[in-house]
Image (tube, coloured by chain):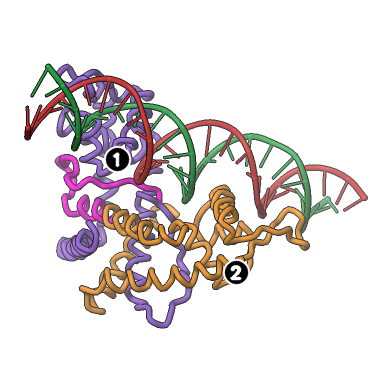
Chain colours: A orange, B purple, C green, D red
Amino acid sequence: MAKIKMPGDFYEQTPDGNILATEAVMNTIRTADMVFDSIGRMLRPLNVSAAGGLALGILRDFGSMSPSELGDRLIVTRATVTGLLDSLERRGYVHRSANPADRRGLIIELTPAGRAVVQELRTIIHRYEKDLMGGFTDDELRGYVERLHQIQDALAQEQG
Amino acid sequence: MAKIKMPGDFYEQTPDGNILATEAVMNTIRTADMVFDSIGRMLRPLNVSAAGGLALGILRDFGSMSPSELGDRLIVTRATVTGLLDSLERRGYVHRSANPADRRGLIIELTPAGRAVVQELRTIIHRYEKDLMGGFTDDELRGYVERLHQIQDALAQEQG
DNA sequence: ACCATATTGTTAGGGGCCTAATGACCTGGC
DNA sequence: GCCAGGTCATTAGGCCCCTAACAATATGGT
């Protein structure tokens, strides 16, 4: 995520502000940041970042693809993918090769080591997710996810 | 936030995973990221980043303080504050001076330009927040914020 | 007084994200 | 066939965040 830590005590409201809206926005970012950091700590022993793990997972599920397509799936620019691949390739989790069908392009493949990391990582993440959300009923989770979708829709609308 | 863009189609579940929990975690991060980016775009004309704006707001509301205290309020390390201040000082929004009471320390002050930016910024942000959350009733917002707090509590517990 | 211990801000190094610019390469329309 | 206008991946430069290590300075206990 484009990151920032949202402080607990936010700054004073302007008279026309809506406290509830402000709190919703602020806590949305703050919560996500905490979750993200926590996942990062959890993945540390595996020698992958959250971003790297996500990329490896996509490569496992969808097969080899170009950096461009990977960027589309990660919702990230091609420039970011270049850096991410540099890092993953250095760790031996991924391999860049030429695309015979298009001399501009590359094909990114998971190495056996990369494939192994995805397995470990998923086990860890899924247990983490279950633990974190364990205090909610399915209905509560469904309601929560729906709110998030509504916010995403509002965002997509006011400026795609 | 430590950021990553969560892709819409997440990777395949492991058999023992809980789809709802995974979706909740994934959408939490994804939504926050979208919101954060959207705020960043909105603040661009003001020549401040979201992090910078937050820092300026804190300085306005709590008065001059040390980089350490600012870091505590922003929930960020001192090292991060150093960089943030470099950036804000370059823009003329903030001023570093020596702390007469402690020769190790500094005191960070808002400049008049910095103070002006805070005003504009808040007007923009509060309107944005109202617009974004305009589709929800107060009760819905309260429920949503409560969920977020519950997740934060769960996070704080399992590893402060 | 004196010294171990803690704190302050900075630097160095590692990621992740973005925009803008670049050269190599496709493609479609003429 | 040719060339304008896309697209591919990369680099350069910016911002934000983190950990680790540093010198300078405080502080508290003996």
- The answer to whether any part of residue B109 appears in the image is no
Residue ID for mark 1: B77
Q: Residue at x 21, y 29 (%)?
A: B66
Q: Residue furthest bottom?
A: B15
Residue B21: x %, y % from top left: 32, 73
Local SS, label 2: helix
Residue B38: x %, y % from top left: 38, 49
Local SS, label 1: loop
Foreground residue among B85 and A86: A86
Residue ID for mark 2: A112
For residue B80, above or below residue B20: above
Q: Which residues are magenta?
A: A1-28
Determine if the magenta segment contains residue A19. Answer: yes
Query: Image check: A101 left or right of B103?
Result: right
Using the rendered view, name the quadrant where residue A153 is placed.
bottom left
User: Which three-letter amino acid code belongs to the residue tagged 2?
Assistant: Pro
Residue B67: x %, y % from top left: 25, 31
How far, Cα to Cα, is label 1 from label 2?
A: 37 Å
Determine if the magenta segment contains residue B9. Answer: no
Q: Residue at x 17, y 65 (%)?
A: B143
Foreground residue among D17 and A19: D17
User: Which three-letter amino acid code belongs to the residue tagged 1?
Assistant: Thr
Foreground residue among D8 and A14: D8
- The answer to whether any part of residue B117 appears in the image is yes
For residue B115, above or below residue A120: above
